Image (tube, grey):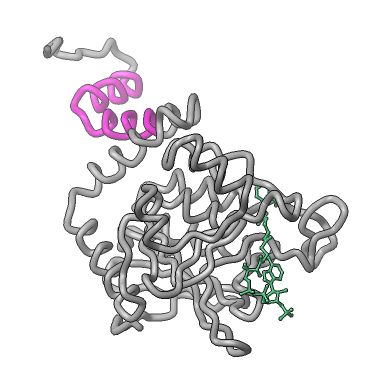
Amino acid sequence: MSSIAWQTAKEYDDITYKKYNGVARIAFNRPEVRNAFRPKTTSELLDAFHDAQEDTSIGAVLLSAEGPSSKDGVYSFCSGGDQKVRGQQGYVGEDGYHRLNILEVQRLIRFMPKAVICVVPGWAVGGGHSLHVVCDMTLASKEHAIFKQTDADVTSFDGGYGSAYLAKMVGQKKAREIFFLGKNYSAQEAFDMGMVNAVVPHEDLENTAYEWAQEVLAKSPTSIKMLKFAMNLTDDGMVGQQVFAGEATRLAYMTEEAKEGRDAFLEKRAPNFDKKWLP
Ligand code: S0N
């Protein structure tokens, strides 16, 4: 399925984490439960995504999945929260506490200054469907990808990006159909409604995702970052503004004006901004 010489970046239990040539690949690795996530999985995802964010050699991240299941050969991307570790208050970790930290994973994908491409080799269901929604782009296996929302079947629902942002993507009526009826949608149907960027033959899926990542890597990193944050801004309210504005401030730090402001303070003198109020 892939001819890329991925190098393992770190060993985990529930995910795999690899890198090659500027691209990070983070993949669910619980195919026997259709790649459902438990608190341990989400902690590992957070760790890997943080690493990919901080690593200046990485410009794009693929979020994918290992598989197929050794039991029945079925491919999956992710089937959402692991229902077997669901307690009365939520998803219970090995320490006995319930956690909702998949939302932290969603925020990291959303706010990281690099492109995140979702690679869907099979089932994308429940919270797994929401993860694909929050990624910057989605590529889906022509033969095996199936998109489905079961949140309303199991009373474990995503009222944030997974539903509201989906509605912005596919339209209000379609998003309500997806959540209210919980039907299966093929890769082509998902493409037709605007939530998948490309339908790819299964055997080419990972190579295609890697090629898309390489195309992103050829672009200006500042442009990719600012465009991602600009496109997020209107939907993310004041937080979207904060993320975008943080990068504007970082760019301002690189100017002569900023250097003069800092130096004047440190030298205890009035700043000379060499006033040029450019249009
Ligand atoms: C994925 C489905 C459609 C696949 O069907 P298929 O191919 O017929 O396989 P099955 O025989 O059903 O499954 C094979 C084995 O895998 C286990 N399994 C599958 N999914 C899960 C799962 N989510 N949790 C635990 N185990 C799972 C099966 O039990 C079976 O095991 P064995 O062989 O031992 O019997 C189908 O499997 C399916 O519908 N799965 C459930 C999908 C689902 O309802 N997911 C949860 C939806 N909700 C969320 O994900 C919420 C996410 C969330 O965490 C969240 C989000 C926002 C705000 C808050 C939260 C929060 O934390 O609560």
- Identify which residue is drawn at 35% across, 52% down: 192
Instruction: Where is residue 244? Give x, y as percent.
Output: 37, 32
For the C terminus, which image quadrant? top left
At horizontal 30% and vertical 81% (from top left) the residue drawn is 4
Magenta segment main secondary structure: helix
The reply to whether residue 46 is in sight is no
Q: In which quarter of the view is residue 127 placed?
A: bottom right
Residue 126 sits in quarter: bottom right
- Residue at the right extreme, as displayed: 88
Q: From the viewer's perspective, tell me whether residue 239 is left or right of residue 200.
A: right
Q: Is residue 226 above or below residue 98?
A: above
Occupied quadrant, residue 203: bottom left
Which quarter of the rendering shows the N terminus? bottom left
Question: Could you tell me residue 223's position as x and y percent?
Answer: 23, 42
Q: Nearer the viewer, residue 110 or 146?
A: 146
Q: Is residue 12 left or right of residue 250?
A: right
Q: Is residue 58 visible?
A: yes
For the residue pair 171 and 211, the one nearer the viewer reads as 171
Q: Is residue 223 above or below residue 1?
A: above
- What residue is rendered at 63% in x and 45% in y? 180
Q: Is residue 80 left or right of residue 67?
A: right
- Front one among 111 and 208: 208
Q: Residues in magenta?
A: 244-267
> At x 59% / y 49%, what residue is drawn?
104
User: Whole-percent x and y of residue 101?
Assistant: 66, 52
Magenta stretch: residue 222 in it? no
Q: Quadrant of ligand 1?
A: bottom right
